[in-house]
C-alpha cells in the first residue's frame, strides 16, 4: 500500500478547505443577490407610482352636474309641507335623491321667494315661502341656485333682499340672479370643484312685478349686463354656466327670443346654458361658438316641484352631464336625462269641483316608478309613453333613461 507523506496530506487538506470556501462564496453571492432583489422589490412598492400612474385620476378633473327645473311653492306644496313645529319640504325629494346624490353640482331654480312669514306666506299668483324652503332645497341636494325668474319680485325688493340674505347664510356653491345692491349685481359668482373653476350667471326674461328696480333681478334684455358678466366669466373660469329663465309658458317649441339669446351667449363664450320657465320640457342642442368651442343648451328642463295640472307640467327630470378638463381643453360629455313625475292625491269628485286645496301627499317619482301614480291621477299615459315623448322633445343627442 502506498504511503502518504505529511506534505501530501497537508496539500489535500488545503484543497478541500479551498473547495469548501469556494462553495460558501458562491452561495454567499447568490444569497446577497437574492436579498438585494427582494430589497429593491419591496422598496419599489413604497416609491411613487410611474409617470402613467401618477397622472390625476379622472375624478380630479371631472365634475358631474345635475340640473332640476322649477321649484314652485304652490299652496298645495307648502300646506302639505307643514309639520307640528314648522315645515318639511325635503320629503318630496326622497324617491329621486338617488338620481343626483353622486353629483358634484346640483342646479335648482327656486321659483318662489323664501323671505318668510313677515312678508306673508302665499302661493299663486304672488309666491312667498317660509325661509325653511331655501334650507330644505339645500338639504335635498341643491347647491347652485337660480334666483332670476319672473316670480322673484312678487313681494317687492325687501323680500328679494331677505331671500338673498337667507341663501347667503346657507352658503351654497353659488346663488345668482337676485341682488340687494347694484354692486352685488355686477359680481360674477365663482366656485371650484375637482380642480375646475366655474362661473355661474343667472338671468330672466321679465318680472311679474314691474315696480322692482333693474338691479333687483337680472334681466337678459339688459344686453350690456349680459355681455359684461358673461365675458368676464369667460376670462376667469374654466366653465361658464348660465341660467336663463325664458321661453313661452306651456310651449315645448323654442321661440325666437330664446334663439337670439343663445346666439349672444355663444358669442360671449358660455359653455352650458340651463333653461327654465316654460314649465314644460324643450329641446337640447349643442351650439357652435365663434371661438371654435361648443355650447350645450338645455332650452327648458321643465318643472320639478309644483302642483300644476297638466301631464306635461308634471313631467320633469334630472338633466345630467359631466365636464372634463384635459389640459386647457374643456370637454362636455354626452348628456343624460332621468324623467320624473310630480304626483299628488286628488279624487275625481274633488277634481271636478275644482277643489285644488284638497290635494294632498305630493311626491316626486322617477318616471319608471310612477305607473301607479299616473293611474291614480287618471292620466291617460304610461311611464313608457311619457319616456318616448320626452326623448322626442329633447332630441337624439340626449340619452333618456
Image (cartoon, rainbow, N blue to C red):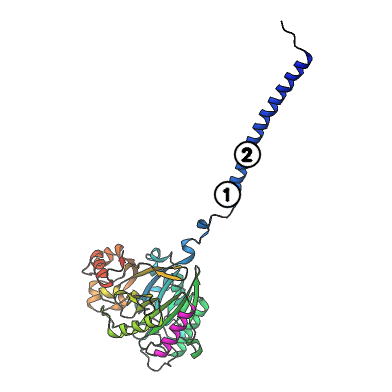
Which residue is outermost to the bottom? 211
Which residue is outermost to the right? 6
Q: Position of residue 329 (x, y in %)?
A: 44, 70
Say which of 308 and 264 sits in front. Answer: 264
* Local crowd size for mark 1, using a 10 Å CA cut-off: few (<14), some (14–19), many (≥20): few
**Residue 149 visible in the shown view:** yes
Looking at the image, residue 178 sits to the left or right of residue 23; the answer is: left
257 versus 331 height, above or below: below
Secondary element under disc 1, as helix, strand or loop, is helix
371 versus 302 height, above or below: above
Q: Position of residue 357 (x, y in %)?
A: 31, 78
**Residue 87 visible in the shown view:** no
| Rendered residue at 50%/69% (across/down) | 195
Secondary element under disc 2, as helix, strand or loop, is helix
Which residue is outermost to the top? 1
Say which of 342 and 377 sits in front. Answer: 342
| Rendered residue at 31%/73% (across/down) | 284
Which quadrant does the C terminus fall into?
bottom left
Between marks 1 and 2 in the image, the one whose residue lies nearer the viewer:
2
Q: Is residue 218 magenta?
A: no
Looking at the image, residue 6 sits to the left or right of residue 24; the answer is: right
16 versus 353 height, above or below: above
Residue 215: quarter of image:
bottom left
Q: Main SS type for the magenta part?
A: helix
| Rendered residue at 51%/76% (across/down) | 170
- Name the residue tied to disc 2: 33
Q: Is residue 228 magenta?
A: yes
Q: Which mark is residue 45?
A: 1
> In the image, which residues are magenta?
223-236
How many callouts does the rendering have? Answer: 2
Say which of 63 and 349 sits in front. Answer: 63
Amino acid at each position: 500500500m502506498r504511503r502518504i507523506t505529511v506534505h501530501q496530506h497537508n496539500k489535500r487538506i488545503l484543497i478541500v478547505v479551498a473547495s469548501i470556501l469556494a462553495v460558501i462564496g458562491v452561495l454567499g453571492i447568490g444569497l446577497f443577490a437574492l436579498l438585494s432583489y427582494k430589497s429593491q422589490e419591496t422598496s419599489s412598492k413604497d416609491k411613487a407610482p410611474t409617470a402613467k400612474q401618477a397622472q390625476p385620476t379622472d375624478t380630479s378633473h371631472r365634475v358631474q352636474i345635475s340640473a332640476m327645473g322649477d321649484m314652485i311653492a304652490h299652496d298645495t306644496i307648502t300646506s302639505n309641507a307643514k309639520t307640528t313645529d314648522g315645515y318639511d319640504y325635503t320629503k318630496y325629494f326622497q324617491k329621486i335623491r338617488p338620481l343626483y346624490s353622486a353629483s358634484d353640482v346640483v342646479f335648482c331654480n327656486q321659483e318662489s321667494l323664501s323671505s318668510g312669514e313677515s312678508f306673508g306666506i302665499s302661493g299663486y299668483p304672488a309666491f312667498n315661502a317660509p325661509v325653511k324652503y331655501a334650507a330644505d332645497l339645500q338639504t335635498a341636494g341643491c347647491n347652485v341656485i337660480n334666483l332670476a325668474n319672473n316670480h322673484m319680485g312678487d313681494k317687492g325688493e325687501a323680500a328679494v333682499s331677505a331671500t338673498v340674505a337667507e341663501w347667503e347664510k346657507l352658503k351654497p356653491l353659488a346663488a345668482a340672479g337676485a341682488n340687494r345692491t347694484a354692486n352685488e349685481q355686477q359680481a360674477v359668482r365663482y366656485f371650484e370643484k375637482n380642480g375646475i373653476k366655474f362661473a355661474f350667471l343667472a338671468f330672466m326674461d321679465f318680472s311679474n312685478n314691474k315696480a322692482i328696480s333693474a338691479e333687483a333681478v337680472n334681466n337678459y334684455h339688459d344686453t350690456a349686463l349680459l355681455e359684461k358678466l358673461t365675458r368676464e366669466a369667460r376670462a376667469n373660469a374654466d366653465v361658464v354656466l348660465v341660467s336663463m329663465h325664458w321661453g313661452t309658458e306651456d310651449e315645448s317649441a323654442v321661440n325666437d327670443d330664446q334663439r337670439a339669446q343663445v346666439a349672444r351667449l355663444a358669442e360671449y363664450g358660455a359653455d352650458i346654458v340651463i333653461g327654465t320657465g316654460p314649465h314644460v320640457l324643450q329641446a337640447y342642442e349643442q351650439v357652435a361658438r365663434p371661438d371654435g368651442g361648443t355650447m350645450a343648451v338645455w332650452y327648458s328642463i321643465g318643472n320639478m316641484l309644483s302642483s300644476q295640472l297638466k301631464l306635461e307640467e308634471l313631467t320633469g327630470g334630472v338633466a345630467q352631464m359631466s365636464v372634463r378638463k384635459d389640459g386647457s381643453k374643456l370637454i362636455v360629455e354626452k348628456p343624460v336625462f332621468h324623467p320624473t313625475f310630480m304626483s299628488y292625491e286628488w279624487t275625481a269628485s274633488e277634481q271636478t269641483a275644482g277643489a285644488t286645496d284638497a290635494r294632498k301627499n305630493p311626491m316626486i317619482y322617477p318616471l319608471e316608478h310612477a305607473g301607479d301614480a299616473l293611474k291614480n291621477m287618471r292620466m291617460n299615459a304610461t311611464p313608457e309613453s311619457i319616456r318616448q315623448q320626452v326623448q322626442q322633445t329633447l332630441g337624439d343627442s340626449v340619452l333618456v333613461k
